[in-house]
Image: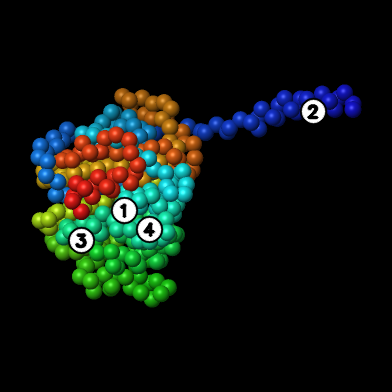
Amino acid sequence: MNKRYVLFFLLLITIVLPALSQTPECPSQTYVLEHPYSVEKITPPKGHKIKNVILMIGDGMSLMHVYSAWTANRGKLWLDNCQYVGLSKTYCANKLITDSGAGGTALSSGYKTNYHSVGVDTNGKPLKSLCTLAQEKGKSSGIAVTCRLWDATPADFCCHNVDRDKEMDIVADYVNCGIDYAFGGGAAYFENRPDGRDLFKELQSKGYQTPRTWADVEKIKSGKVFAIPYSKDTPVPAVRGDLLARASIKGLDLLNQNKKGFFMMIEGSQLDDYGHSNDLDMLMQETHDFDKTIGEVMKWAAKDGETLVVVTADHETGGLTLVDGNLKKGEIVCKFSTHEHSGVMVPVYAFGPGSENFSGIYENTEIFWKIKKLLKL
């Protein structure tokens, strides 16, 4: 072989192979919270009676999301008021990296299930959620989310399907789920359906009020409510403002009219969306919105005195890493490692009576069993 060809191939190997073996550098993103919000110290109630439990889920939220949000808000979050912290293992029955269907089902119903399943076990058998168990004990139950109601997490608490993508079928399950309060998006699949059903009319026939605007929701003083003001997801935080907090407190006030107590699930849904799209700006907006909602819920719970608040996530999204920043300036520099979910454990925070039960490291299914025991369901 000609020496020139030998030298050429040696040069090619020297330059190309190292380049092929290197992982592409993930670009960093910088975010600054221009207007930090104030946070107060909330004194938890001293009693031990637990009449109500509020489970708050930050979809896709990890410790890195929390710490990044904490840094951006100059070292303070409402979440800091929690008395106890634990860690939850999120893997599902047939995959190490879970999704909101299986992850949420573990939280809602206490069993690991298959990837993409909602509210069913590994054989497709419907599972009873905390909402259903509360109703069977004469308690009230409800949900408030910022996503469409056919999305996995709200469906995990009210619906049953082996495939979260069967959205039309999932939405139809809400008619018979029996919860007392629902707030979210997704009106598009409740009416003008291919099967000709009008789920709003069916809900009304079961005694539900079905307000289609927030102004109409505000007017309601009692009774069962199924509020879906938006065709799909709710607007972004800059447009919707503190809607999740208002919808959550409205639900709590209505459910609390039941003297036997209640269970409510509240989700900061769209953290997950911006983890998937690797959009740090919008991810932080959603995380701070969720934290502000946590603050309002904690204040409500502290005043009530018999309400436990548990805050966790179903999984992590985006592989977020905080690589630099400035605490005084509220600046964070972050990188994402994936557009999908990752397998890290997620935090569990607890505030109020019974919060001591949520420290330690445990399976995500244990959150269900702890709440079930404390509410005596």
Which numbered disc, 1 or 2, marks the residue closer to the eye?
A: 1
Residue labelled with disc 3: 136
Residue labelled with disc 1: 109
Residue 335 % position (x, y): 46, 33
Residue labelled with disc 2: 9
Asked whether residue 155 is in view, the answer is no
Q: CA distance from mark 1 to mark 2?
A: 60 Å
Q: CA distance from mark 1 to mark 4?
A: 9 Å
User: What's the residue at 49%, 36% (across, down)?
Assistant: 337
Which numbered disc, 4 or 2, marks the residue closer to the eye?
A: 4
Residue labelled with disc 4: 120
Answer yes or no: do the residues labelled 4 and 3 have beta carbons within 8 Å? no
| Pointer 3 or 2: first along the chain | 2
Name the image quarter holding the C terminus: bottom left
Name the image quarter holding the N terminus: top right
Q: Residues within 10 Å of mark 1 (few under 14, many from 20)?
A: many
Answer yes or no: do the residues labelled 4 and 2 have beta carbons within 8 Å? no
- Foreground pick, 178 / 212: 178
- Kindly identify the amino acid type of the residue bearing the numbered disc 4: Val
User: What's the residue at 14%, 46% (across, down)?
Assistant: 50
User: What's the residue at 40%, 41% (across, down)?
Assistant: 316
Answer yes or no: do the residues labelled 3 and 2 have beta carbons within 8 Å? no
Q: Which element is circle 4 on?
A: loop
On screen, residue 63 above or below 206: above
Protein image colouring: rainbow
Answer yes or no: do the residues labelled 1 and 4 have beta carbons within 8 Å? no
